[in-house]
Image (spheres, rainbow, N blue to C red):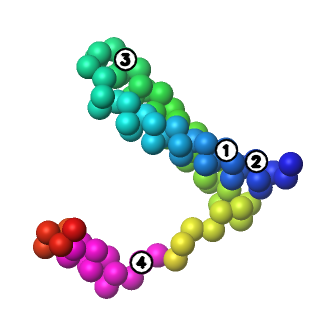
Amino acid sequence: MQEKTMVSDTLASINGELVRFGEMIPQTENKELKSALKQMRATCEQSQEQLYEIAREKSYYVPAQKASQEEVDHVKGLFTSGTL
């Protein structure tokens, strides 16, 4: 398997884990469990950031072009006007 594929698959897996943490944390009433899940999520986020930087350095991942100020203002307007 190529390195690029492994990095991409790992990033997808980590992103999935972050989604699951986001679902689990607000659903638990146990404070100790909630704290442990938050710590695990933070560690997972750090791993994701490190792997993302490696992917960018090796040009395995090229982020989308930045939004124009007009596009940003349009989206902000949708949220503030209650259109969504």
Relative to 7, say whether 62 is above or below. below
On whether residue 18 falls in the magenta region, the answer is no
Residue 3, image x, y percentages: 81, 51
Q: Are marks 2 and 1 in contact (CB under 8 Å)?
A: yes
Q: Amino acid at mark 1?
A: Thr
Q: Mark 4 packing: few (<14 Cα in 10 Å), some, or many (20+)?
A: few
In the rendered structure, which disc, 3 or 1, sits on the residue that comes first in sequence?
1
SS class of the residue under badge 3? helix
Query: Nearer the viewer's eye, disc 4 or disc 2?
Result: 2
Q: Are marks 1 and 4 in contact (CB under 8 Å)?
A: no
Quarter residue 31 falls in: top left
Q: Mark 3 packing: few (<14 Cα in 10 Å), some, or many (20+)?
A: few
- In the rendered image, the residue lying farthest to the right is 1
Residue 6 shows which numbered tag? 2
Residue 57, image x, y percentages: 69, 60
Residue 33 shows which numbered tag? 3
Residue 81 falls left or right of residue 69 = left
**Residue identified by numbered label 4:** 67
Quarter residue 42 falls in: top left
The total of numbered circles placed on residues is 4
Magenta span of residues = 66-78
